[in-house]
Amino acid sequence: MAKKKKLSKEELKAENNKLRQEVRAKNAGSTEDSERIVNSLKKENIIAYALILLLPIVGVWWLWHKRETLKLNNASMLLWTGIGIIILVEQVMLIWQYLGY
């Protein structure tokens, strides 16, 4: 293995400043997570979540119909679809029990 060259104090400070600037530039550009959080709290998204919880058939359809507008990633789409299906099955089971079958 090759030996590493020792840097002088000035060279070390310059290298550290260069690395800090690269990290700042990288962090400033990655706003995707914060945008996704903000988008998930918009009025349309909250209405879609409420529809899934109250009327799962309509809510799941709305979620997939408006997927570009809601700006949800695939994992969120599948999660909310799964929640809607579980609630739909529970509602059908309650109706079945209520009717006495």
Image (cartoon, rainbow, N blue to C red):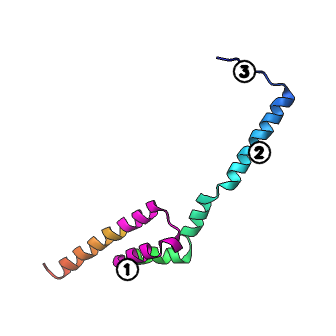
Q: What residue type is labelled 3?
A: Lys
Q: Callout 2: helix, strand or loop? A: helix
- The furthest residue to the left: 101
Picture disc at residue 4: 3
Residue 56 in the figure: left or right of residue 41: left
> Looking at this view, is 40 or 71 the one in front?
71
- Residue matched to label 1: 58
Who comes first in sequence, dot 3 or dot 1? Answer: 3
Residue 95 in which image quadrant: bottom left
Q: Which amino acid does label 2 sit on?
A: Gln
Q: Which image quarter is the C terminus in?
A: bottom left
Percent from the top left, x then y, of residue 15?
79, 34
Percent from the top left, x then y, of residue 29?
68, 55
Residue 17 in which image quadrant: top right
**Residue at 35% in and 76% down:** 56
**Residue at 71% in and 45% down:** 23
**Residue at 32% in and 71% down:** 87
Residue 51 in the figure: left or right of residue 16: left
Picture disc at residue 17: none
Asked whether residue 78 is drawn in magenta, I would say: yes
Is residue 53 visible in the rendered image? The answer is no
Mark 3 vs mark 1, foreground winner is: 3
Mark pair 2, 1: CA separation? 49 Å
